Amino acid sequence: MSDSSSETQQPDGEEKTPEPTLSDDVQELLKEIRSHSRRLSRAKNLLKGIANNEPRPADYEAWLEVHQGLDGYELGIAELDELREKVVSRLGSDLQRLRVKARMKFLTKVNLLADQADIEVEKISEAPLVLYLRPLTFEIDFEEGGVRMLYGHELIDDGLSIDAAALLEARKKALSEMTSQGMESEDFFDLLRSAYRTVLVADGAEAGERIDLVDVLVPLSLLRAKKKSLRAKGPEALKPFSRHLLAWQLAKLRRHGMLERDGMRLDLGAATGGSTRNKSDVLYIPVGSKSGQYYGSLRFEKA
């Protein structure tokens, strides 16, 4: 006679996972229903607040959230899924109309606020919408409902909402941070040269040899840290030297004619063709709103 306890054990002696009970199945079904209900309630509340309003960019983002929340979300019941697809289809049609109105309203408000702040707005492209508010670039994505802020091609923030006032405020904050974290060109030239020498030592290279430009980011962070803070906190005391700040400082060196100092010259090596494929290995330094160059290396040599 077989032992009944063997029915609950695997051949290797491990216990089997118990079969779900009827109560477990009912609880799982209730969980799924509640999940559907919460999602649909969220859609209902959003629609109630925006359906009859003159569309603003924030309203458009809310509509987009509803559409993305319901699109592709299968309910598992044919009749309900048919109704859901009908709702999604109508939302898609309305989104096309709202996108145009929200875009026009957004651009009008950006130009108004920028004019009040004496900031020139330049439209770089129409689709996708890209604006240049010197010296920063803003990529406005109405398909996903967000804004990316960049210096040249170097990302500063990709979590901005499609809101004119928020865009101007983000620009103000970014410029303030770059100014406070930045350095005078003479001081930065000397710091960059020290960072270059640090990389040479790490690479076992000789003075005057080229190094990868992005490799100076960590030494720049280390060399700027206070010794007292480093001793107290260790690596936690290091504040990252961002890519956009490095690009900004290098562009500033050029504007100030500070590529030579104390008998030494900074030589930046342009990156072209396939070398620009991996953007993490190169750095883009802008010249105005529409031009610039990727650079991949640097060296210091006698002038």
Image (spheres, rainbow, N blue to C red):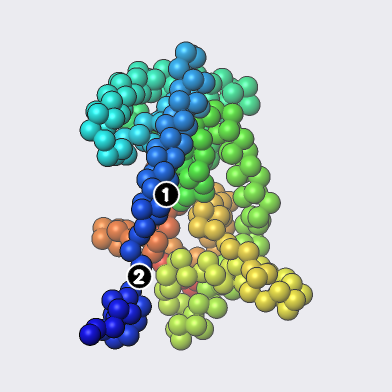
Q: Residue at x 32, y 76 (%)?
A: 8
Where 24 sits versus 146, above or below? below
Q: Amino acid at mark 2?
A: Thr
Say what secondary structure mark 1 lies in: helix
Circle 1 is placed at which residue position?
27
Name the side, left or right, on which 193 lies relative to 23.
Answer: right
Say which quadrant the N terminus sits in.
bottom left
Q: Residues within 10 Å of mark 1 (few under 14, many from 20)?
A: few
The image's mark for residue 17 is 2
Count of all numbered marks drawn on residues in the image: 2
Q: Position of residue 40 (x, y in %)?
A: 42, 31
- Secondary structure category for the residue under label 2: loop
Which quadrant of the view contains residue 172? top right
79 and 227: which is toward the camera: 79
Compared with 101, 230 (above or below) is below
Decide which of tag 2 and tag 1 comes sooner along the chain: 2
- In the rendering, which numbered label is found on residue 167? none
The amino acid at mark 1 is Gln
Q: Are the two marked residues, 2 and 1, in contact with CB atoms closer than 8 angstroms?
A: no
**Residue 277 on image: x %, y %:** 29, 58
Q: Residue at x 26, y 58 (%)?
A: 273
